[in-house]
Amino acid sequence: MAALEPRSVLVTGSNRGIGLELVRQLVEKSNRPEWIFATCRNPEGTEAQVLQNLAAKHQAVVIIPLDVSDPSSVRAAAARVTEQLKGAGLNLLINNAGIAKLSTMETETPENMSEVYQTNVIGPMLVSKAFLPLLRKAAQESTQKGMSCSKAAIVNISSRAGTITEILGWHTGPAISYRCSKAALNMLTRCMSLGFAEDEILCIALHPGWVQTEMGNMVGLAPMMVDGSVQSILNSLGRLSEKDNGVFVDWEGKALPW
């Protein structure tokens, strides 16, 4: 089985939930990345204490302030990562940061729709564009053939709740703005896969499962533990190649309907 072996990884929304667990498991790998850039909006806040403790124990973890909804914050983060990499490229970008607002068709508001879309769709677009030069550099300098998450890749953490085919979990939680944002993120991923194909940057949308996180438990106790989800995600990322470019997969790498 192919192994995930990127030299550098950046994870947005790393102070809790899936993002934090991704950083934790990456740094504990026997072949861990040389650089693990863990980003969140307020690295100095109490909500990032666990991440701070992790970075204090592991030199590979570099905490970077990043608010994905703020273009100036995104640019500043890209500049800091570029400086840290000292001429090297970025192999793997995981757009994990996201928010959700509970709503029905009767209670949904323009304000909620705009806020959720700004973070869940525009955010990944801004971040991906800002780090594109580093991803291109990694792809150009790699000796690997084809595409992989060890070479140069963008992984957008999506949700099966955004599938138009299934409308999964409607009766559990309509969450209109969240569903619409994830459907849009899936299309953005497809566009990225086409736009960055010549650069050999692998782009996928990934459903991590219904996981026991602060967001995941908003509509009831989620059935999956975060550590199991992330372990499967990292195993699956190691197996992805150019044949998976632009697809929507779950934590086990299985293709999902749009």
Image (tube, rainbow, N blue to C red):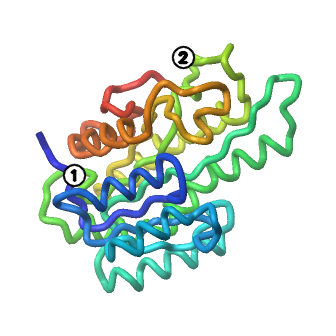
- The percent coordinates of residue 225 (x first, y second) are 43, 34
Picture residue at 32% right of the left edge, 53% below the top: 25
Q: Are marks 1 and 2 in contact (CB under 8 Å)?
A: no
Q: Quadrant of the N terminus?
A: top left
* Among the 4 quarters of the image, the one containing residue 218: top right
What label does residue 201 carry, if any?
none
Q: Earlier in the sequence, mark 1 or mark 2?
A: 1
The type of residue carrying mark 2 is: Thr
Q: Nearer the viewer, residue 68 or 241?
A: 68
**SS at circle 2:** loop
- The percent coordinates of residue 75 (x first, y second) are 57, 75
What label does residue 165 carry, if any?
2
Picture residue at 84% right of the left edge, 32% below the top: 108
Label 1 and label 2: CA atoms lie apart by 31 Å
Picture residue at 60% right of the left edge, 48% below the top: 98
* Among the 4 quarters of the image, the one containing residue 235: top left
- Label count reads 2
The type of residue carrying mark 1 is: Leu
Look at mark 1 in the image and give the residue it sits on. Answer: 4
**SS at circle 1:** loop
Picture residue at 65% right of the left edge, 39% below the top: 181
Crowdedness near tag 2: few (<14), some (14–19) or many (≥20) residues, C-alpha within 10 Å: few
- The percent coordinates of residue 71 (x first, y second) are 65, 69
Crowdedness near tag 1: few (<14), some (14–19) or many (≥20) residues, C-alpha within 10 Å: many
135 sits to left or right of 72? left
